Image (spheres, rainbow, N blue to C red):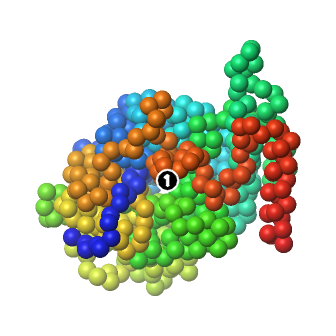
Amino acid sequence: MPTNTKELKPVILNAFCMGTLGLQCPGLWKHPKDKSKNFNKIEHWTYLAQLLERGKFNAVFLADVLGPYDVYDGPGNLAPVAVSGAQFPTTEPSAVVSAMAAVTKDLSFGITFLTMSEAPYHLARRLATLDHLTNGRVGWNVVSSYLASGARNLLNGAELTPHSERYNQAQEYLDVVYKLFLSSWADDALELLDGVFTNPDKIREIAHEGKYFKVPGVFVTHPTPQRMPVVIQAGTSRQGKEFAAKNAELVFITTFSAEELAKQIADIKKIAKEKYGRPEGSIKFLQLITPVVGKTHEEAEAKYQELQLYGDLEGAQALFSGWTGVDIGKYGPDENINEAGTNAVKSFLQLWNKKSPGEPEGAAKTRKEIAKQITVGGLGPVFYGTAEEVADEIQHWVEVSGVDGFNVTYAVNPGTFEEFIEHVVPVLQERGLAQQDYPKVDEDRNLTFREQLFGTERKDPTYFLESHPAYDLRWRAGESRDEFERRLNKKRKSEAQDVE
């Protein structure tokens, strides 16, 4: 068991899911205990939501892609993902949230929406609707997209926007959404008194005109319980870290060592503090893991090896090629890609110290071995062993990296979650590493997503921390339109001077 002189605090536990057969583990839908084939059934999702809430998970995170992974042996090769079900086909992620919210009280929902898939005005209304219907349990994973296959169907034949420009466009997109949520309606615009439903003097146009978007407003949906859904980000490229440091309240990271995770977290925190004045604790970080639990260590190893037998190696290579943008099929099955690959792949594989049971240290990173490893756990590490050993590994990563929690994904769905909740969560609770219950709030409302992350004791716990750059965009109760616009103009002038 790891030694720790500091008092342990509960980590954030998210379940990482997707409306598809194979999120991180292609081919494992063939396992006799797997029920991923029911991803298009509402009961599949309501059962999962109730299970996770019983396990005191903070949230379920729903991933999404809007095109197939077709780089491997491509371009345009759909066969590997079609056969294996590797994130193909998929269903729209937000459609199941209302049903999951209806059968739970405190579980929150992180939803992936791409900034290139629809106009920001339309997305803002969808997000606002979900925040209303869930009573403030929604977060938005802001994704600018990375799949050319999706762009071909969304951009009227145009090519995928270059990486650096995609983040610039995503920033303006998010700025529009901030304004619609926070600056179009005053907190007290909805009066419901003396025959007046909404006070028209408490609504204004946002009048946004930028490089990519022209959105006059006004917003079509009234203020939501959180005023703005939780802002989530995934990706650790240079531009991704910058975007996260400025905007994100929750960041998803995927790496294979606690030491590397510590570096990634430190990088984002440094930018956030030095450039945007966001102090320690203003961003929460989660690491992807796949737990495989056994009564003994040997049983867990055997279970891991059995899972790999169901894995689809072609689907695994399709995922790898989609994640890196480089066709792994160009290399021989036994070729050490870390020596022969492109710079892009080499830099990716330098962090790849994922190990399967029985694998020796320093094993060559061949195409065949990488594909085999991806079949269980995908782009993240597998924590396998007894419940105590899995808890030890979780504690080790917390102590070394300072990570705030974990995106727990499945090998077998929902079996992985069932075993983790039955066996590992109680061990974590005994150590103080998992919450015993959800924090209590006023009886007339439920816990919001933001309170899951930052607690319930703040003055305004459902809203942004004061250090968030969008904090002052909110039109507060009691402010006239003129007062609010004077305050906004003062803020803009101050920001412009800071840039100069």
Percent from the top left, x then y, of residue 379?
42, 63
Q: Is residue 138 left or right of residue 410?
A: right
Residue lying at 40% horizontally and 40% vertically, measured from the top left: 440
Residue visible at 85% across and 53% down in the picture: 489
Q: How many marks?
A: 1
Residue 61 visible in the snapshot:
no
Q: Is residue 164 left or right of residue 330?
A: right
What residue type is disc 1 on?
Answer: Phe
Q: Position of residue 422 (x, y in %)?
A: 22, 47
Who is closer to the viewer here, 413 or 30? Answer: 413
Give the quadrant of the N terminus.
bottom left
* Placement of 71 over or under 199, stated as above or below: below
Q: Position of residue 396 (x, y in %)?
A: 31, 70
Is 214 on the left-hand or right-hand side of 56? Answer: right
Q: Residues within 10 Å of mark 1 (few under 14, many from 20)?
A: some
Q: Which residue is mark 1?
A: 454
Q: Residue at x 83, y 39 (%)?
A: 481
> Tag 1's secondary structure?
helix
